[in-house]
Amino acid sequence: MRVAISTDGEFVSAHFGRCPSFTILDIKDGKIIKKDVVENPGHLPGYIPQFLHKQGVGYIIAGGMGMRAAGFFNEFDIMTIVGISGKIDEVIEKLLKGTLKGGESLCKPGSGKGYGVDKAQCDHPDQDEHKH
């Protein structure tokens, strides 16, 4: 199982699309076999779900995300778990124990403006690849 966590320093980012990075975990038999941190590739609608899908991610854990982002993840068969806050290590511990419970999204549309990675900072060569 491969899981991505929206990350801001040592904490789960409240604003999924604008988080500075993602912590990506490979979990097998209840143990972490690999842990990487990758930079957010840019906040362009639909791009992050596509990027994480290409990384083989099956689950995304975040403080919050909008309905549109959740829809993009659904298109890529990536399960979303929102309403999560706290230190990454504590969240990972709950995930491994099976006690991590999602809830209501912690961010509302537009509330992340001015935080983290802004849409104007996107710079990827295949930006239009996510369009159908």
Image (cartoon, grey):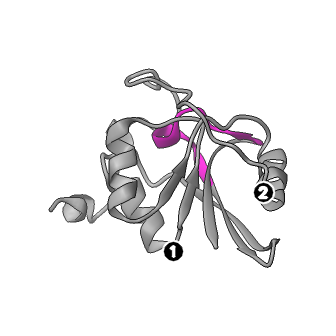
Q: Is residue 105 above or below residue 92?
A: above
Q: Whole-percent x and y of residue 43?
A: 39, 44
Residue 86 bears which disc, if any? Answer: none
Residue ID for mark 2:
98
Left or right of 24 on screen, residue 28: right
- In which image quadrant can residue 76 be found? bottom left
Q: Whole-percent x and y of residue 57?
A: 53, 68
Q: Whole-percent x and y of residue 30?
A: 81, 71
Circles 2 and 1 in contact, beta carbons < 8 Å: no
Q: Counting residues from the N terminus, which is met first, the one under dot 2 or under dot 1?
A: 1
Left or right of 49 on screen, residue 93: right
- Mark 1 crowd level (few <14, some 14–19, many ≥20, 10 Å Cα): some
Q: Is residue 78 above or below residue 21?
A: below
- Mark 2 crowd level (few <14, some 14–19, many ≥20, 10 Å Cα): few
Q: So how many labels did they put on this image?
A: 2
Give the CA separation, mark 2 to mark 1: 21 Å
Q: Residue visible at 51% across and 51% down?
A: 80
- As for residue 16 lying within the magenta part, the answer is yes
- As for residue 90 lying within the magenta part, the answer is no
Q: Residue visible at 44% across and 23% down?
A: 108
- Under mark 2, the amino acid is Gly
- Under mark 1, the amino acid is Gly
Secondary structure, mark 2, is: loop
**Residue placed most toward the observer, 81 or 117:** 81
**Residue placed most toward the observer, 102 or 87:** 102
Q: Residue visible at 44% across and 68% down?
A: 53
Q: Whole-percent x and y of residue 120?
A: 33, 37
Q: Is residue 11 above or below residue 74?
A: above
Q: Residue visible at 76% across and 35% down?
A: 86
- In which image quadrant can residue 66 be found? top left
Residue ID for mark 1:
56
Magenta segment boundaries in residue numbering: 10-22
